[in-house]
């Protein structure tokens, strides 16, 4: 058996990825890997196709050509194994309208087999700065608070891959400092992080590799 065959698969592998909307080439021939415990930041101008690529990574959209694998397996949003491995905050977060912030995080924890979902929800609410509104419904929250709750939903559950689309949005300076610390903590536990960001300071603080989306077309 060759030493090459013993190497672990990258947590995320994107190969010759391309996506079109009709005659519009969104991106073409995109190639990169993200190893476990590493963070890859995708940067570039609006319209470069960064968010569309993330949607393909999490299975919310599909490539026209090329491939994306997660821990060596092709993306399949219908697979329980895939859903268990990948946590994401991409696009407008889905909220349970009738659940409070604390109940929402508890339910996410229960769905993913967290040992103590109540205590985990309490801890995450403190981490994301939402303790004071833990009993509020989503309709009563600001956009920034809902964004923090979405981040909390990704962090309250087990994961091997964390995908974040402009996670700095709606966060003040202290929130962005917390975010950088949280992403680096993810790396230390072996999670692979893929994020799109326009925040140079955040990218500098967390990224091990940078992919320039402006080169994709």
Image (cartoon, rainbow, N blue to C red):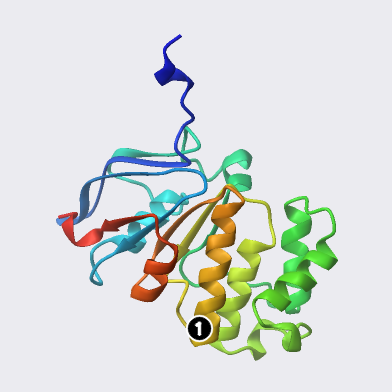
Is residue 77 placed above or below 102 in the rendered structure?
Answer: above
Residue indicated by mark 1 = 171
Is residue 44 placed above or below 169 in the rendered structure?
Answer: above
Asked whether, in this view, residue 166 is left or right of residue 79, the answer is left
Residue 140 spot, x, y in % from top left:
66, 90
Q: Nearer the viewer, residue 90 or 166?
A: 166
Displayed quadrant of residue 212: bottom left
Residue 38 in view, yes or no? yes
Asked whether, in this view, residue 66 is left or right of residue 71, the answer is left
Which residue is pictured at 63% across the width and 88% down the height?
Answer: 141
Is residue 86 placed above or below 16 in the rendered structure?
Answer: below
Asked whether, in this view, residue 95 is left or right of residue 195, the answer is right
Residue 98 in view, yes or no? no
Residue 193 spot, x, y in % from top left:
48, 55
The quadrant in which the C terminus is found is bottom left
Which residue is pictured at 52% across the width and 48% down the height?
Answer: 37
Asked whether, in this view, residue 29 is left or right of residue 103, the answer is left
Q: Nearer the viewer, residue 75 or 212?
A: 212
Displayed quadrant of residue 209: bottom left
Which residue is pictured at 39% across the width and 55% down the height?
Answer: 208
Tally the numbered discs: 1
Which residue is pictured at 76% across the width and 63% down the height?
Answer: 107
Is residue 77 placed above or below 204 in the rendered structure?
Answer: above
Q: Secondary structure at mark 1?
A: loop
Residue 108 spot, x, y in % from top left:
72, 61
Q: Nearer the viewer, residue 141 or 36?
A: 36
Residue 134 spot, x, y in % from top left:
76, 82
Few, some or many residues within 10 Å of mark 1 (<14, 14–19, 20+): some
């Amino acid at each position: 058996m060759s030493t090459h065959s013993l190497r672990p698969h990258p947590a995320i592998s994107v190969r010759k990825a391309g996506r079109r909307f009709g005659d519009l080439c969104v991106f073409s021939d995109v190639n990169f890997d993200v190893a476990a415990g590493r963070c890859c930041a995708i940067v570039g101008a609006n319209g470069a196709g960064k968010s569309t690529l993330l949607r393909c990574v999490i299975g919310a959209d599909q490539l026209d050509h090329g491939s994306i694998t997660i821990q060596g397996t092709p993306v399949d949003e219908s697979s329980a194994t895939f859903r268990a491995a990948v946590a994401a905050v991409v696009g407008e977060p889905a909220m349970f309208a009738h659940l409070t912030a604390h109940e929402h995080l508890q339910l996410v924890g229960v769905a993913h087999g967290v040992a103590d979902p109540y205590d985990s929800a309490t801890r995450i609410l403190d981490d994301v700065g939402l303790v004071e509104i833990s009993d509020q419904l989503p309709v009563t929250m600001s956009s920034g608070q809902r964004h923090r709750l979405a981040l909390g939903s990704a962090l309250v559950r087990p994961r091997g891959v964390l995908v974040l689309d402009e996670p700095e949005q709606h966060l003040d300076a202290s929130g962005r400092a917390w975010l950088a610390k949280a992403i680096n903590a993810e790396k230390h536990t072996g999670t692979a992080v893929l994020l799109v960001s326009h925040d140079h300071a955040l990218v500098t603080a967390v990224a091990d590799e940078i992919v320039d989306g402006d080169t994709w077309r």
